[in-house]
Amino acid sequence: MEVLERLVFLDTETTGLDARLGHRIIEIAAVEAVGRELTGKSLHFYVDPEREIDAGATAVHGFSWDDLRGKPKFSTIADEVMSFLAGARVVIHNAPFDVSFIDSELARLRQPPVGKRQLTVTDSLVMAKEKFPGKRNSLDALCDRLGVDNSHRNLHGALLDARLLAEVYFAMTRGQGTLEIATENLTPTAELLGAISQDPMPSILPIEVSAPSEAAHAAIVEALTKQSGIVRQWH
């Protein structure tokens, strides 16, 4: 019996661009698929980052710290998040960014990082760069290129982005089918051979050239011969 792979598509939103500078997760979401089919299972949390959010980050996702006060802190959801990811191949677009933030949150709790967990991380951005070298490979660009509808994506949101990522991933990894031709079906039948013999290729029709045209052609050939010093047969 074939065992179908469990995939989890994950995305985060943060207070800034660098976890090493103390920036935190403000939203985390993941959706599950088994055998290339979404199961309907998902995980989604808004998180109190316990700090201010950079203006540039707010411009991307639309959240200020005031919007998130009173939401659970990462310490209260960490076990549920990591349990959802356990045993899966976790697909993340630009994985080092999100993993660095998750690792930073886990380090605060003195828990093992993602790399020491029972899961595998796949970076869909690396996949996209290999498949479409030299092109823009943001999630929006891939949606446009692969025909994934992202018209409802005005601001970045972790749950919506995780769902879009799943569609993009399935589109990027869709089988191309076989290019082999089934030669056993190409043996000509008697009927086909008979039809060919009765309907031969038409003969090539002769083209009549007028005397003035022949004279003009001869003049051009003579001029080219004088310029190049080479005599060619021009037909």
Image: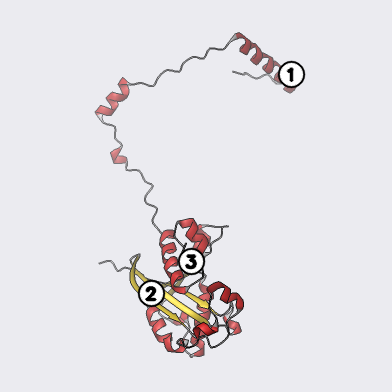
Precedes in sequence: disc 1 or disc 2: 2
Q: Secondary structure at mark 3?
A: loop
Q: Is residue 188 above or below residue 6?
A: above
Q: At numbered mark 2, what does the secondary structure look like: helix, strand or loop?
A: loop
Kind of residue indicated by mark 3:
Arg
Q: Position of residue 68 (x, y in %)?
A: 50, 84
Residue for badge 2: 88
What amino acid does circle 1 point to? Lys
Element under disc 1? helix
For image coordinates 35% across by 21% down, the residue present is: 200
Q: How far apart are the two marked residues, 1 and 2, measured between alpha carbons?
A: 78 Å
Q: Residue at x 59, y 82 (%)?
A: 20
Residue 196 % position (x, y): 32, 24
**The quadrant where residue 59 appears:** bottom right
Left or right: 162 as drawn, with respect to 41:
right
Viewer-proximal residue among 72 and 117: 72
The residue sitting at 46% across, 78% down in the picture is: 28
Q: Nearer the viewer, residue 227 or 173?
A: 173
Q: Which residue is mark 1?
A: 226
Tell me whether the residue at label 3 lies in contact with that at label 2, contact meaning CB atoms closer than 8 angstroms: no
Q: Dot 2, how many residues are within 10 Å of its Cα: few (below 14), some (14-19), or many (20+)?
A: many
Residue in the foreground of this view, choosing between 53 and 139: 53
Residue sitting farthest toward the top: 211
Q: Residue 72: x, y in percent?
A: 45, 87
